[in-house]
Image: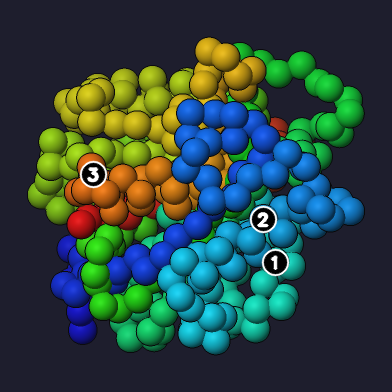
Amino acid sequence: MDIKRLSRQTCRFLRPPGVVSWANVGGRLERQGPLGSYFDVTDDDSFFGKKTWEQGEAEMQAIALRRALQKGGLTPEDVDCVFAGDLLNQNIGATFSLRDFAIPFYGVYGACSTMGESLSLAAMAVAGGLARLAAAQTSSHFCTAERQYRAPVPYGSQRAPTAQWTVTGAGSAVLESKGEGVRIRAVHIGTITDYGITDAGNMGAAMAPAAARTIHDLLEDSATTPADYDRIVTGDLGAVGTKLLYQLMEQDWGIQLAGHHKDCGMMIYDLKSQDVNAGGSGCGCGGSVLCSHILKKMEQGALRKVLFVATGALMSPTSTKQGNSIPGVAHGVVLEV
C-alpha cells in the first residue's frame, strides 16, 4: 500500500499521485478580476449558451473537464472515475455536466469545500490502485446560488458588508498514479466544526473555525509549520473569515499565518474596484483558482509546496429558515513539485 496513515484524518502518499492536467472556466466578473488571464475559458453570457443558469453551470463543468482532458491529451475513456459536486440541490451541476462523458461517477457534497473533498478522494482512489486516472471537479454560479440560497436575482436584495459574492466558475483536475510534475503528497479529512454562527450573510465567520482546525491538525500530524509551505491557501473565507482565521490560530495555538497565507476569495476579485463586499465564495472560487493560478505557479516553479484548504459552510435554505447554526468543514490537500 502506497499510503501512510499519520492520524485518523491525515494520510501521506508514499508515491504521490500526479496532477496530469487541469482547466478552469469563469464568467465576466472573474475575467475582469486580478486572475482573469489565468482562466482557460470565460464567457460574458451568464447562461453559457443554455436556457437557464442551472444548465449554464452544468455546461461550465463540462467545458472544464473537456478542456482538462484536451490539455492532457486524454479522452473520457481514459478516465476511470470522476468525483464531482456543486452547490445545487441533488448536485445537478455535476450530474448534468457528465451525462455525455460516460465516465463512472461519484457525486460529492462539501459545500464550498467540494474541490478539496473531490481532490482528496480522487488522490486516494489513484494511490490505492482503484483507478489509474481519476478526475476531480466542481463549480458554482452567482445566479444559481442566489436563487437557491438567498433571493430571486431580479429582486436585487441589499447585501451586508460581511456577505460574499458567489464565484461563477468551475475547475477540473485529472490525477494519475505516476506522480510527475505537481503531486499530491498528503490529504487531510476535515471535521465538522460549529461555533454557532446563524447569519447566512457571514459565511466567512462560519467557515473560519473549521479552517483553523484543519490547518492546525494537519500541521501537527505532519510535524510541519507554516514556514514549511510556500503558501497556505484557503478556499473562500473572504476578508472577514481571513481575519478571524488569523485570530483563532494565534489565540488557540500561537500560530501566526500572516505572511504565509492567501485566500482564493480575496485573490479572484479586486475588493477595492469590484463590488463584491467581503470577497468571493462558492465551490467555483477555490476550484477555479486552484485549477489555474495555483497549479500554474507550481508548474512554473514559482511555488513548490502548497497547502490547499478548501472551506465549506454546510447549510441549506431549510436549515437557515429553521434557525439552525451553520457548521463548517475544511479539507486539506498538500501539493508539491
Residue toward you, 288 or 310:
288
- Secondary structure under the numbered disc 3 in the rendered image: loop
Q: Earlier in the sequence, mark 1 or mark 2?
A: 2
Q: Secondary structure at mark 1?
A: helix
The reply, left or right, for residue 59 in relation to residue 285 is right
User: Quarter holding the N terminus?
Assistant: bottom left
Q: Quadrant of residue 241?
A: top left
Residue holding disc 2: 60
Residue 5, x across and y down, in percent = 20, 69
For disc 1, the neighbor class at 10 Å (few under 14, some 14 to 19, many from 20) is many
Q: Is residue 56 above or below residue 209?
A: below
Badge 2 element: helix
Where residue 336 appears, x then y in whole percent?
Answer: 22, 55
Q: Residues within 10 Å of mark 2 (few under 14, many from 20)?
A: many
State whether residue 317 is above or below residue 174. above
Label pair 1/2, CB-CB below 8 angstroms: yes
Which amino acid is tagged 2?
Met
Residue pictured at 23% horizontal, 42% vertical: 302
Q: Can you see residue 167?
A: yes
Location of residue 258 with respect to 117 vertically, above or below? above
**Where in the figure is residue 240, as x and y percent of width and height?**
47, 20
